[in-house]
Image (cartoon, helix red, strand yellow):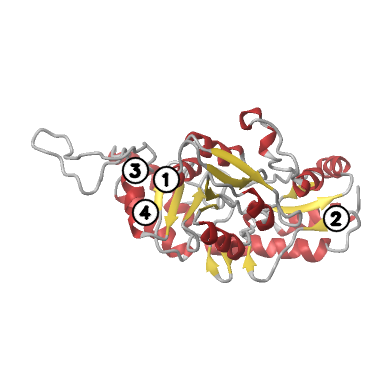
Amino acid sequence: MSIPIFHTHISNDAPDAVSAVLRTTMLSEGALVSRFEESLCKVLGIGNSVAVNSGTSALHLALALSGVGPGDEVILPAQTFIASGLTVMMTGAKPVFADINYSTGNLDPGSLRSKISGRTRAIMPVHWGGYPCDLDEIGAIAREFELTVIEDAAHALGATYHNIPIGKISDFTCFSFQAIKHVTTGDGGSISARDPNAVAEARRRRWFGIDRMGSAPSLLGERQHDVGEVGFKYHMNDYAAALGLANLNGFAERLARIRSTASRYRESLKSVPGITLFENSTDRQSAFWLFGIHVERREDFVLAMRANGITTSVVHQRIDRNSVFGGITEGLVNQVRFDETQIHIPCHSGLSDEMIEHVVRCIARGW
């Protein structure tokens, strides 16, 4: 038996949906992108969605919409994918890394507060593995210091905090539809924003700053526009949207299955020696893009799982190891501990009951 840590769900309807778009030869942003945005809002229970071509583009665009630029600082955890920090640098600002909670991998509000300076412009909490950050505490700090909150929700599609969907809470929320996420468009992303003006600006700036829907071509064939802000080529196209629309079908059922798997893991593994489960508070629901645990003798654990056909991974370790960020940030005590013990086991909609039982059985045997 071979059990991968990730699974790419492709709907049975996807080939026909994408082929239909290809046959039209109208491949750029069109009606299907709007339909995907509307469906995303309906499925997630959020108020708005602006589709773009990647989660990285979503983060960079949100930073630009927030006015982040040269000389500014953005506080985020080092426990994330490198894209989070790089998007800050793309604006000319400096990423400042705060510590995390050892039991979740999420940004620690206390450490966040200690990192605020006169140059801080925004906070980028990352919902590690799909488990929502402490958004009440983070939001209160942001209001106190008049900072923008940009949630990196690449892992958190379908997660909730105090029964409120992620995507409906902070100034900006950025999702990813990359190949191995819960819903894929091949590659893609989206931004949700609380301010309707920010939504309108996001729609313009994702396509060079031109109002694509409101700028009719002249007699000579070019759209009539006057671009007054820096825009980007970040729009989603219709064949990506067609794939996304097909893959949104059944999302709620797949997410329920993933959460059921996570519950089985928590119940079955809670008493296994050498394992500490991550926090799972009742005031929030994780999307469980990852199921993380802390293990003793981690390399032995990885080898034992590999011998039984089970793929495990840290997925990401602290990104400030990369020289582009100027070196390791000192004093992130929980981040150091987290890097030493964290590991993730398969938890996705492609797992059969037999696979889940195999994972549990192999871990329970020890390593």
Amino acid type, label 3? Arg
Q: Residues within 10 Å of mark 3 (few under 14, many from 20)?
A: many
Q: List the residue tagged with mark 1.
A: 67
199 or 267, nearer to the observer: 199
Q: Considering only order in the chain, which callout, 1 or 4, is on the residue closer to the N terminus? A: 1
Q: Tell me where residue 39 appears, x and y as whole percent.
A: 40, 59
User: Where, by quadrant of the figure, is residue 195 drawn?
Assistant: bottom left
Q: Considering only order in the chain, which callout, 2 or 1, is on the residue closer to the N terminus? A: 1
Q: Considering only order in the chain, which callout, 1 or 3, is on the residue closer to the N terminus? A: 1
Marks counted in the figure total 4
110 or 40, nearer to the observer: 110
Q: Nearer the viewer, mark 2 or mark 4?
A: 4
User: Where, by quadrant of the figure, is residue 237 drawn?
Assistant: top left
Q: Nearer the viewer, mark 3 or mark 2?
A: 3
Q: List the residue tagged with mark 2.
A: 275
Locate residue 290 relative to residue 270 in the image: left or right.
left
Q: List the residue tagged with mark 3.
A: 205
The answer to whether residue 262 shows anywhere in this view is yes
- At a point 11% along the width and 38% down the height, the residue shown is 218
- At a point 74% along the width and 53% down the height, the residue shown is 292
Secondary structure beneath label 2 = strand
249 or 203, nearer to the observer: 203
